[in-house]
Image (cartoon, coloured by chain):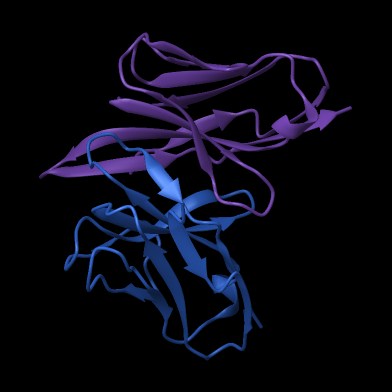
Chain colours: A blue, B purple
Amino acid sequence: TAGITQAPTSQILAAGRSMTLRCTQDMRHNAMYWYRQDLGLGLRLIHYSNTAGTTGKGEVPDGYSVSRANTDDFPLTLASAVPSQTSVYFCASRLARDTGELFFGEGSRLTVL
Amino acid sequence: GQQLNQSPQSMFIQEGEDVSMNCTSSSIFNTWLWYKQDPGEGPVLLIALYKAGELTSNGRLTAQFGITRKDSFLNISASIPSDVGIYFCAGHAYSGAGSYQLTFGKGTKLSVIP
């Protein structure tokens, strides 16, 4: 069972370059999310999508953009990476909006130099 | 936005000991969730709590949804080395206009000494 697949697993990126982190789920979940995890700060929501065709901003959206062209895919793009975007990024999905149960991917470790 | 205070931040325990961690909030939540994150992996749901006062077990894990709906605790009994990881609490609440918000605590890092 695949669940949520993230790619790449890790990446080193030069500052100023663009990067897209990919996320695909095969559970037909309506809602999808992108979090970043930093030491001492826990999980912080970057962007979310309640359903295909809609997106919204989370707690730390600046410097990131997302799209939700279909139910399965939710890519996260960094248009011009900066060192403060060095982090571990997690994609997650949720079946029903009123239960709160998120399923997470394995994470993408991004280092911006 | 809503904030969760999770404690302790980290703990070192001897194998076989019991562990307790908790989360408190100034806001009311409809659901409390507890996740575990193994090193290098994504968080995995351990226990979900849906009603105030609810006490739920999952093997050696027990979690409770506080009566006030503003707190929750997680206990692990007879810890073993594979319990090592970061434990997150999360609270879920209706935030208006058809929107639901999930708020995470900052995590409790558990180390088990064999």
Count of numbered circles in the view: 0
| Residue A25, quarter of picture | bottom left
| Residue A111, quarter of picture | bottom right
Residue A63 shows in this picture:
no
Q: Residue at x 66, y 34 (%)?
A: B9
Residue B50 is left or right of residue A36, and the answer is: left
Q: Quadrant of the C terminus of chain A?
A: bottom right
Residue A9 is left or right of residue A4, and the answer is: right
Q: Is residue B44 above or below residue B24?
A: below
Q: Residue at x 55, y 60 (%)?
A: A107
Q: Is residue A88 above or below residue B87?
A: below
The residue lying toward the viewer, choosing from A109 and A9, is A9
The residue lying toward the viewer, choosing from B100 and B48, is B48
Q: Is residue A94 above or below residue B13?
A: below
**Where residue B55 appears, x then y in whole percent?**
44, 10
Q: Residue at x 55, y 74 (%)?
A: A8
Q: Residue at x 41, y 38 (%)?
A: B3
**Where residue A98 appears, x then y in whole percent?**
22, 36
